[in-house]
Amino acid sequence: MTNTMFDTLLEAIATADIITIFRHEHPDCDALGSQWGLYSWIKDNFPEKKVYALGYESTTQCDFLVGDVVSDEVIANSTAIVLDTANTARIDDARATSAKRLIKVDHHPNREPYGDPCIVNPLAAATCEILTDFFKTFEEDYFISFDTALYLYRGILTDTLCYRTNNTTSHTIETGAYLVSKGIDVADVNRDLFDVPYAVFTFQNALRSKVTFEDGIAYAIFTKEDLAKWHMTGGQARNYIDELGHVREFEVWAIFTESDEHPGLYHGSLRSKHVIINEIAQQFNGGGHPNASGVKNLTKEDIEAILIELHKAIHA
């Protein structure tokens, strides 16, 4: 990113009395890590400001702080910074767009430019990578605490699947090393993020048993009744999508879960090694990275249509 954009972001933070920080619905560790990393950094360096981290959902992969509850008036009078969210419809609190100033920081393809500034770097492996660059640009004047570094490192580590995705670059690894230099125990963070309790281990076995594999595509479909057996929400089940990513023959893999709010409709998480899937996801109420995307509000016929499109993409 250009220093000019970072200068504009710093100016926006420095001159705002109230700052609200948002991220996408069904958040992963990059969304939450960037949100709480920015929150921590602002609180450390601008203690006089009112700063709020907003959103209704969290993740089971790691413990994050509970989001703030604020009035419509607070948001309307704030500078809102939206992180890791490609389009405004995915913000996990629609009130973000009512703020007097809206800023976007993201690493997804910029198909819906919004915000001023609109800071998007699709070459970055994670939004946490972009924020680390921002903080490093001004580290002579503003410090990065251990807590801030830990939030950001979690986001980079999970969005790259421990530096295994094809958007992991030398800069990504250098960024991770820089954050580790702030005192992070790498082994401890890995255990915190990726070790699971026995109940989850048994669910992962059930997930594998439900997988259908054909012509390079592996997928599992969970109904509400399936999920109830494991006392899981659909979002929690889809968090285990990466359990399917270690099989050589799997070119594309997916988990579809029946919606709690709309029985008969399904949400899905899609992943791939090389196949570009976000363009397909955009046709089915979704989007995301070229190799990691989400879809929502699908009928069973839609799921069949997605699988057909994925087959075409594999053989294109």
Image: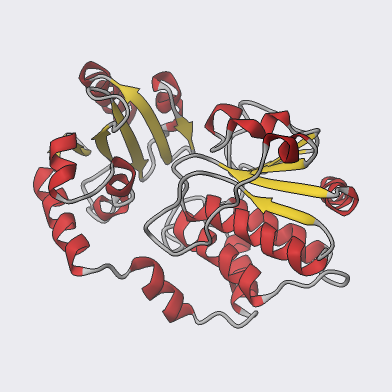
Residue 3 image position (x, y, % from top left): 85, 51
**What residue is drawn where x is 22% and y is 22%?**
264
Left or right side of 36 for 223? left
Is residue 36 positioned above or below 219 on the image?
below
Residue 167 vs residue 264, the one in the foreground: 264
Residue 306 vs residue 235, the one in the foreground: 235
Among the 4 quarters of the image, the one containing residue 280: top left
Residue 155 image position (x, y, % from top left): 53, 59
Residue 213 vs residue 138, the one in the foreground: 138
Among the 4 quarters of the image, the one containing residue 235: top left
Residue extending farthest to the left is 209
Left or right side of 164 for 69? right
Quadrant location of the C terminus in the rendered image: top left
Residue 106 image position (x, y, % from top left): 63, 43
- Tell me, yes or no, if residue 304 can be seen here: yes
Residue 113 vs residue 62, the one in the foreground: 62
Residue 313 image position (x, y, % from top left): 34, 27
**What residue is drawn where x is 65% and y is 68%?**
148
Is residue 76 positioned above or below 156 on the image?
above
**What residue is drawn where x is 63% and y is 66%?**
175
